[in-house]
Image (tube, helix red, strand yellow):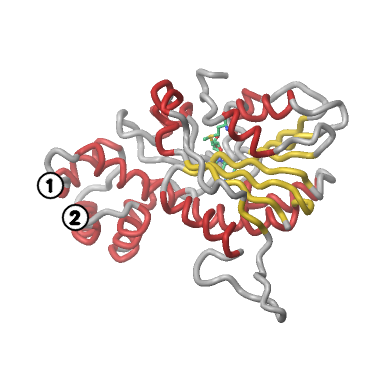
Amino acid sequence: MSEYHTPVMLNECIEALNIKPNGTYVDVTFGGGGHSREILKHLNKDGRLLAFDQDADARQNIIEDDRFVFVDQNFRFLKNFCRLHDAIPVDGILADLGVSSYQFDQAERGFSIRFDAELDMRMNQESELSAKDVINNYSEAELHRIFGIYGEIQNAKSLANTIVTSRLNTPIVTVADLKNVIANRIPKGKENKYLAQVFQALRIEVNQELEALKDFLMQSAEVLVSGGRLVVMSYHSLEDRLVKNFIAKGKFSGEVEKDLYGNDNKPFDTVSRGVITASEQEINENNRARSAKLRIAIKK
Ligand SMILES: C[S@@+](CC[C@H](N)C(=O)[O-])C[C@H]1O[C@@H](n2cnc3c(N)ncnc32)[C@H](O)[C@@H]1O
């Protein structure tokens, strides 16, 4: 299991869920199952755990346990599949966003700048859109938007133009092709950071990560019992901003709405500690924990 993925802030997540031994819990990002296994340890024989993962490879970690159900779906369909499994209302939901170490380390999945492979980056290997499609078929304006907004890349406009000009001659198929094509756009000495931003942008677009997160957050409010916990761990600021705003305001931008009596109209209360980050020791042992931000909310 730990070779697949080392769970980040395991104790903090379990504490945040405040597990009721006979409760129903959902781990929407099963991955290597590190968090799920720990949740099961805190449940008695009447407890239940549903675990979502859209990547078929996560099936190799399925836990043999009568209290456990694996749902091979995108978590943007949280409500439908909780309903299908007769699991509403749920007592707690955990989301550990992004890709697993396993996914990064599989060269052919195309997630990592360390390997050469076809440009893919699909978490769900059945889905239609790959990074190759985005790079070769999106318009210059769309690429500009994706690199600017999802990658927070300074020269997004000229980057998009370089790609569109180059693909007129030859399609850009592999990670190495892409690196070659954009080499002149990369600021000297910042190669890794720049490429990581380009890859982040492509990954977010290919997997529609922000749309899926928004759908999930809205549905979490509908499936949780009053007093139930929403625990979300994110790894970049675009995700964290959505989580933070949704918990604080019940929406993704703008100000919180008020009801007729002037009370805040929002589904969650924030747990007073605000954002939680990993300890120095954990960061030293697991570099992935460095960027993790954990937020906890309680359903009103
Ligand atoms: C960071 S890993 C989770 C690791 C897990 N907590 C553990 O301890 O091993 C994220 C996992 O969530 C899955 N995932 C990401 N976005 C998803 C989505 N929208 N729907 C379903 N699964 C998703 C990925 O395929 C990946 O396996």
Q: Could you tell me which residue is drawn at 43 percent across and 53 percent down?
A: 238
Q: Could you tell me which residue is drawn at 67 percent across and 29 percent down?
A: 36
Residue 192 seen in render = yes
Q: Is mark 2 within 8 Å of ligand 1?
A: no
1 sits left or right of 43 in the view: left
Q: Secondary structure at mark 2?
A: helix
Q: Could you tell me which residue is drawn at 81 percent across and 43 percent down?
A: 85
Q: Amino acid at mark 1?
A: Asn
Split into quadrants, the picture shows ligand 1 in the one at: top right
Q: Quick one: label 1, few (<14), some, or many (20+) residues within 10 Å? A: few
Q: Is mark 1 within 8 Å of ligand 1?
A: no
* Numbered circles on residues, count: 2
- In the image shown, does 164 or 183 lie closer to the viewer? 183
Q: Amino acid at mark 2?
A: Thr
Q: Are marks 2 and 1 in contact (CB under 8 Å)?
A: yes
**Tag nearer the camera, 2 or 1:** 1
Which quarter shows the C terminus?
A: bottom right
Residue 236 vertical position relative to residue 215 in the rendered view, above or below: above
92 sits left or right of 241 in the view: right
- In the image shown, does 58 or 232 lie closer to the viewer? 232
Which x, y percent locates residue 166? 19, 52
Which x, y percent locates residue 259? 69, 77
Q: Quick one: label 2, few (<14), some, or many (20+) residues within 10 Å? A: some
Residue corresponding to mark 2: 162
Residue corresponding to mark 1: 184
Give the mark nearest the N terminus, 2 or 1: 2
Which quarter shows the N terminus?
A: top right
Which x, y percent locates residue 155? 20, 57
Q: Secondary structure at mark 1?
A: helix
Q: Could you tell me which residue is drawn at 14 percent across and 46 percent down?
A: 187
